[in-house]
Image (cartoon, rainbow, N blue to C red):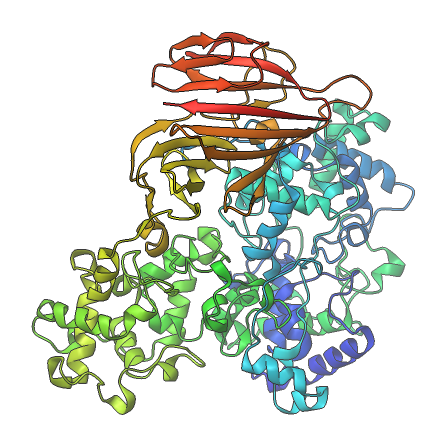
Amino acid sequence: MSSSQTETPFFAAAIIFCLLSGSGNASDVPFVSGFDRFARHQEISAPIAGRLLLSELSCTACHTSTDQLLEPKKGPRLDAAGSRLNADWLKRFLTAPHQVSPGTTMPDVLAGVPTEHKPAVIDALTAFLSSQVQSFPEIKATGLHPVPFEFWKKGDVSVGRTLFHQIGCVACHEADETYEVAEVKPSPIDQMLEQLDPEEIQELGLAAAARRVESVPHGNLGAKYSPRSLTFFLLNPESVRPAGRMPDFQLGAMDAGHLAAYLLSRTADSTGDETELNAAAQSDHPADDTLIAEGRQLFIRHGCASCHSIRGISAQAVDRPLSQLTSASTASASAASCVSPQRDKTGGKPGQPHYHLDEVQLQAVDAALADVTQPASAAAEDPLLERLLRLNCHACHERDRRGGIGRFRKPFFETVGHVDIGDEGRLPPPLTGVGKKLQTGWLNNVLSGKGRVRSHMYVRMPQFPAAQVKPVPALLTAADQSGPRRTEQQVFDVANLSSLTEPGRLLMDAGCVQCHSFKGQSLPGTVGLDLQGVAQRLHPDWFYDFLLNPGALKERTRMPTFFPNGKSQNPDILHGDTDQQIAAMWAYLRDLDRQPLPEKIIQARARDYELKPVDTPIVLRTFMARAGTHAIAVGFPAGVHFAFDAQNLSLAEAWRGAFLDAEGTWFVRFAPVADPLGEDVIALPPGLLIANLPSGTSPWPGDAESAGGRFLGYRLDASGTPTFFYQVGSFRIEDRMTPSGDQQLERVLLISGSGSDPGTGPDMVWLRPIVGKQLQRRSPGSWSSETGLTVSLADETDNVGQQRNSNGLQEWVLPVTVGAQKIIKVTYSW
């Protein structure tokens, strides 16, 4: 069926709806991203729009279809509903789904229940669902990814806010208008849109680019989830929603906790985490076995298992097959239809759900139902488009001038360091022609979240469930590849490609090194794709065509052409033969793992990048073995240096002599750790120096987060010496380290704040100045360890503290009264 046969009434309804509502995101109708972005604006055909609704509203969960593209999305798994969802929220959601969660694709499953019976039905269903309890999985820590005890309670709202606006969440969900982003130069198209009036935009065919993209609603997450349940959902969305409409951003435990804390902070009410989630409902209606059993039967009777899985309950089709349905429109649909507007008056029969669809949606469903019986259905028209619409790939990626990051969301997509490399370098790449460009294996890697090559971008490519994306690579290839694929030999026509690797290396030096890195290494300031693995990612024929004329394959690309009009600009390499030079570049990149780096990168690495403090201190943020990924190294002209771990709020190590080599920090992607260059390197006591303990027998916090620790930054004084600011619990610390006259390190801490309620007496903190396998007391305020380190406290000689054992180590701990403020002076000698 041609689109012209079905689009006229559909698009007329779309225009009327948009004029009346101003938006496709009406709160009382289901919100489907692809439909509301494209179908309401005449950018996809009516049958495809309707088929999208049939899938996303899970119509085919009850009305079965042999068409695999019409697989129902279905709802979340409910095996652990009692562990994840607040019971009071469940009751309100079952009562009025669209009022509690605007835009939800969940129908009113109790529409046919008489009003006087509905409260009892909801109580029983809530009791049954709340009885579905499972333990949360154990998250195992690694050396690079520690998992603090009860990490879901330690989320930092400000960190979560940054994650939400950087990693890609705002491609689908509403951004915080108060979140500040770096100033980004608008693209030429965006600049033009600012100057055009609506009529001119429409005439130029730029309406889609100018339009504000509606967001997927969150609803009141604080009423629905606890911090723990939301954190674990973010860690593994597929375990709850196997349809993959919410993908996996491969968050670490603490990142998920931070993000959950931020999302919950956006809503007024929160369930808390110390009480049982279903306590509110159970207090009024005790969930005895009888009520739970009744709820189980109601769950089956109302067909809930058609969309929601629970162990021990089988799903079954409960209505006519899709091919037997005729129309959903107002004029001809039965009053008993799931989508009939007349259901608002009649209520319908018990056990039949009700979808509140608007006229545009009804027209689209009609078009799809009419199309199902056609020999050449819309399924054959564009199966790839249907798949991309369902997974909402167009929220990030443009394909064939459809979709992509919306105009008003672009500023949130930033590069690391805010380097201006244009939209091409900071926005998710387009999918136009990608089936011709990328090899199938690499496409699979990308879709499974394992194909990251854009380390300069904050946004992440999420991981989708394998079952949902498995057909996509083949669909992309079929859509984009016309004719047989040319082999490497056919493309380059060279008997021995390996003989061209050295000329290829020379050609890389002639231009490619200015924008690209190689094996994680690059010239200073380079921002761009790493060319390692190019031959495993790209098809050779696309590589050849792209180098010959980049603009022909990629609109508005910043990639220059080195072969204008097909002619080489390097006549001294391979006699200026264009085909030979492109073959040489492929040969070098194909064998890059075994080839030397381009000469310019080798020369840059050979330079002396030793940092030498001469007149003022040098402060360098880097990676170090002891100080970790948040290391701040400080070098002094006096020749005594230290490294501070800003994540764990600890002084990690000190040394004398030469300071650091900055090559790895400045020039190597995924920088290797920086090692002290000098001698007399001493490891300083790990962990916090200060903690707020109940008593001297309490265990020392295992990490800064568990002690309420938070790094607040640092400030340089007139001499260039940094003072570090952080908090531990309710105490604020200013921490300054400088060399002493005898080549030791002196540390002065100013502690302020209140660790107890005002008026209850002086505040007290505990110090742990030194830890070791064997400690020896030198004086009342001085102890040494077996490593040769001696730690002395200048003003605490009247308090000798205590030596105690902990986890096979000895610790010196002592209490210190803070009062309003306290200055502590520590000297490290070695």
Residue 769 x %, y %: 50, 19
For residue 684, side relative to residue 756 (left or right):
left
Residue sitting at the far right: 116
Classify 816 as above or below 453.
above
- Residue 777 seen anywhere in this rendered image of the structure: yes
- Residue 72 seen anywhere in this rendered image of the structure: no
Residue 305 x %, y %: 64, 43
Residue 547 x %, y %: 29, 79
Residue 684 x %, y %: 41, 26
What quarter of the picture does the N terminus occupy?
Answer: bottom right
As rendered, which of 283 and 4 lies closer to the eye? Answer: 283
Q: Residue at x 26, y 54 (%)?
A: 608
As rendered, which of 623 and 204 lies closer to the eye? Answer: 623
As rendered, which of 152 and 334 lies closer to the eye? Answer: 152
Q: Residue at x 66, y 50 (%)?
A: 318
Classify 618 as above or below 703.
below
Classify 349 as above or below 312.
below
Residue sitting at the far front: 741
